[in-house]
Amino acid sequence: MCMEKIVLNFWELVNKIPFLPLVISKINEANIKYWLYSGSYVSLIRPNRVVNDIDILVAYEDILKLKEIFPFAETKDYWDCILLYIGKNNEIEFMSYPSININNSKYYLCLTQICWENIIKIKYKKLTVNILNPVDTILQKAFLQRWKEQWKYDLEDISIIIQKNIIDEEY
């Protein structure tokens, strides 16, 4: 996928959520490990992919720093997962240590060192934005396999990611 198109599509996200650059800037200044992922990532490679919120995965060890930066954020705890929401309509959703339960097995979506080493950085004006590697998005969506009735498009998103990206097969 052409980085210029991804940046242009990020601009579209900013048009929907004007305070997004300020939020990203604050988490960058605090050296918080994060990435845009899930539907937010797909919206960057496919401009007509409508998202209702921005999904940001945060390293588990940085979630307390995030709470300090945004003390007004609505916080929810779901078992091991911590969620923080920012915006009048929860337009930005931070997640840390979410898990997926499949056939009585639990799988964690964690920001491991190897994932961190393979993030993609885009530049938007003077802002650097971390986005998830397409391989990690494919894996996450393959586990979930949610459907349109749930307002999710996991299998369709995987197809789009494969069409729009050169997949790093070694990674």
Image (spheres, grey):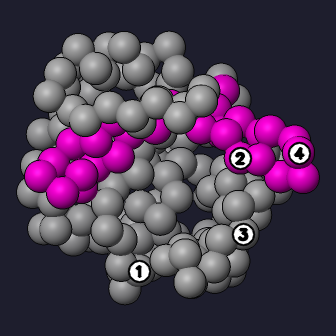
Q: Nearer the viewer, mark 4 or mark 2?
A: 4
Q: Find out whether residue 89 is within the magenta segment.
A: yes
Q: Give the mark, 3 or 1, whose residue is nearer the N terminus.
A: 1
Q: Nearer the viewer, mark 1 or mark 4?
A: 4
Is residue 122 visible in this depiction of the protein?
no
Give the amino acid type for the residue marked by disc 4 in the picture: Asn
The percent position of residue 150, horizontal first and vertical second, equals 55, 75
Identify the residue under disc 1.
49
Give the spatial CA distance, label 2 vs label 3: 11 Å
Q: Are marks 1 and 4 in contact (CB under 8 Å)?
A: no
Question: In what element is the residue under mark 4?
Answer: loop
Question: Which contiguous range is marked in magenta?
Answer: 84-112
26 versus 46 height, above or below: above
Badge 3: residue crowd in 10 Å (few <14, some 14–19, many ≥20): some
Q: Which mark is residue 104?
A: 4
Which residue is at 24% across, 52% downward? 90
Give the amino acid type for the residue marked by disc 3 in the picture: Gln
Q: Are marks 3 and 1 in contact (CB under 8 Å)?
A: no
Which residue is at 15% across, 48% downward? 87
Q: Which mark is residue 100?
A: 2
Is residue 44 visible in this depiction of the protein?
yes
Identify the residue under disc 3.
145
